[in-house]
Amino acid sequence: MLIAPSILSADFGKLREEIIAICDAGCDLVHVDVMDGHFVPNLTIGPVVVSAVAKASTKPLDVHLMVENNTFFVDLFAPMKPRYISFHIEEEKHPHRLIQKIRNLGISPAITLNPHTPPSAIEYLLEDLDMVLLMSVNPGFGGQKFIPSVLEKAARLKELIVKKNAQTLIEVDGGVNNQNIIALRDAGVDIVVAGNYVFGANDYKVAIDSLKV
Ligand code: DX5
Ligand code: ZN
């Protein structure tokens, strides 16, 4: 299992130290939640802060867009050279075009599904995607309760990926902790995002290690 701590739960008063601490504690990616106050009822960070995050991080960035105008935000964050940019399928009329745009920028394209969105929504995009991000909470806030139906969804998505012989990774975001990590692994999940569970812990390394199953 690869671990992507969400910096939404970090102490933004000492963000640089927080980024260094999770990288030193052995995370695999740094998950960056971008919210615009329109697609979700919360507002987070823009390119000024994300470029500071990119400078502090020794691990690749995983940018999760929760915004209305995806193309605009892809252009805004591409200069920080994240490993992944994911956008919500619920908010994109031309996902195939946007996938190509992200890939042409040298970034791995990913699509996010809200809790109600079935894997079939992206069935014909799977081969073009490096990752699918399944929300296990409603996007907008850290510290929410895990929605267990994501386990069945991940297993169904995994079947589709295997059937198509695609290499797409499955990431799950929201309410992940040491109580649900085994079930997530068994459902075929490759990467987990964890905000509160990591940044709320006294020892980031202990928390991250407990998810490496
Ligand atoms: C929610 C964000 C998540 C969130 C996860 O909209 O996409 O990345 O920060 O936080 P936890 O792990 O606390 O649910
Ligand atoms: Zn996220």
Image (spheres, grey):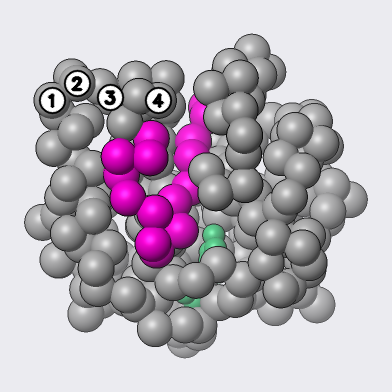
Q: Residue at x 55, y 36 (%)?
A: 84
Q: Disc 2 marks which residue?
A: 164
Which of the marked residues, 1 or 4, is nearer the chain's N terminus?
4
- Cβ(mark 1) to ligand 2 < 8 Å? no
Q: Is residue 164 left or right of residue 168?
A: left
Which mark, residue 125?
Answer: 4
SS at mark 1? helix
Q: Is residue 192 left or right of residue 59?
A: left
Residue 15 % position (x, y): 74, 67
- Cβ(mark 4) to ligand 2 < 8 Å? no
Residue 106 makes an appearance in the image: no
Which of the marked residues, 3 or 4, is nearer the chain's N terminus?
4
Three-letter code, disc 4: Leu
Q: Disc 1 marks which residue?
A: 163
Q: Disc 3 marks which residue?
A: 167
Which residues make up the magenta segment? 106-122
Is 110 above or below relative to 208?
Answer: above
110 is within the stretch colored magenta: yes
Quadrant location, ligand no. 2: bottom right
Q: Quadrant of residue 178?
A: bottom left
Which mark, residue 78?
Answer: none
Q: Are marks 2 and 1 in contact (CB under 8 Å)?
A: yes
Q: Give the distance between the C-alpha atoms of the residues marked 3 and 2, in whole angstroms.
A: 9 Å
Which of the marked residues, 4 or 2, is nearer the chain's N terminus?
4
- Quadrant of the drawing holding the C terminus: bottom left
Q: Are marks 1 and 4 in contact (CB under 8 Å)?
A: no
